[in-house]
Amino acid sequence: MAHILRSILDLLSPRACHICGKRLAVTEEEICGVCNWHLPRTHFVENGEDNELARLFWGRFPIEKAASLFFYKPHDEPSQMIYDLKYHGKEHLGVWLGSLLAKEGKEHGFFKDIDAIIPVPISFGRKWKRGYNQSEKIARGIHEVTGIPVNTKALKRIHFSQSQTHLSASERIENVEDAFCLKHPEDVAGKHVLLIDDIITTGATISSCAKELQKAGDVKFSVMSIGFTKG
């Protein structure tokens, strides 16, 4: 029945691939099979303990494993999905991308022993303007596949200086220094948490979050994002 309803809806209102713009088949979601096949995947989920993203955090905090779905390059076709998620109100894309990442990670046992998912918080003003936190949408998609609870209360963003987009590596670190506040240490003490962001470039934002969460005591971290900007 669901398949029939989807067929009728697609006939009345055809869905298009978010990357190439071609019409989606009934069995396809958000992007077509060709674009999915050519998505520049990192394959980090296959070895979460030692990859380019995980090594970015070595020595910063106790990182267990890390993975991103694809290599992010501004203005290329796959990056349009994240742009649409953040700036064009396509919040459903976050959930779908999160579930896609989770399905691939689950195949390789990435989520073993993880207790909670914590999306990187955004400022109140930015969330009010956008209507949602894109990292929370990604986290919800991961939750739908894994069942791991999402915690949006343990960490709060207490200030926002400017976007990280056009800053240098050192400026990014300074920009998010002391930007977050631990609100409920009892929620994360002694636990293994999965930090979620949409794009990771220098790792400054994730590191600032982890630094604050470590105050709870005996916290282990894993990290996931949709995009990873290769250095």
Image (tube, rainbow, N blue to C red):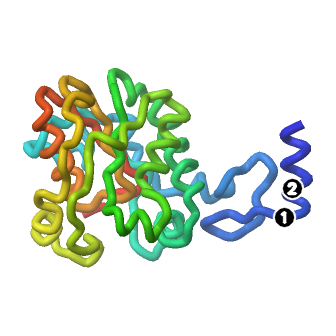
Q: Quadrant of the N terminus?
A: top right
Vertically, is 49 above or below 134? above
Q: Quadrant of the C terminus?
A: bottom left
Q: Percent position (x, y) of residue 215?
A: 10, 37
Q: Tag 2: Cα neighbours inside 10 Å, few (<14), some, or many (≥20)?
A: few
Residue under the image location 52 percent in, 53 percent down:
94
Q: Percent position (x, y) of residue 116?
A: 35, 31
Instruction: Say if residue 107 shows up in the picture.
Output: no
Which amino acid type is marked by label 2?
Leu
Which amino acid type is marked by label 1?
Ser
Residue under the image location 21 percent in, 64 percent down:
159
Query: Regarding mark 2 in the picture, which secondary structure is present there?
Result: helix
Q: Tag 1: Cα neighbours inside 10 Å, few (<14), some, or many (≥20)?
A: few
Residue under the image location 35 percent in, 52 percent down:
197
Which disc, if any, is residue 13?
A: 1
On the image, which quarter does residue 228 sit in?
bottom left
Q: Percent position (x, y) of residue 32?
A: 68, 57
Query: Regarding mark 1 in the picture, which secondary structure is present there?
Result: loop
Vertically, is 133 above or below 107? below
> How far is the residue under mark 2 from the one under mark 1?
6 Å
Which disc, if any, is residue 9?
A: 2
127 left or right, relative to 141 = left
- Circle 2/circle 1 CB separation < 8 Å: yes
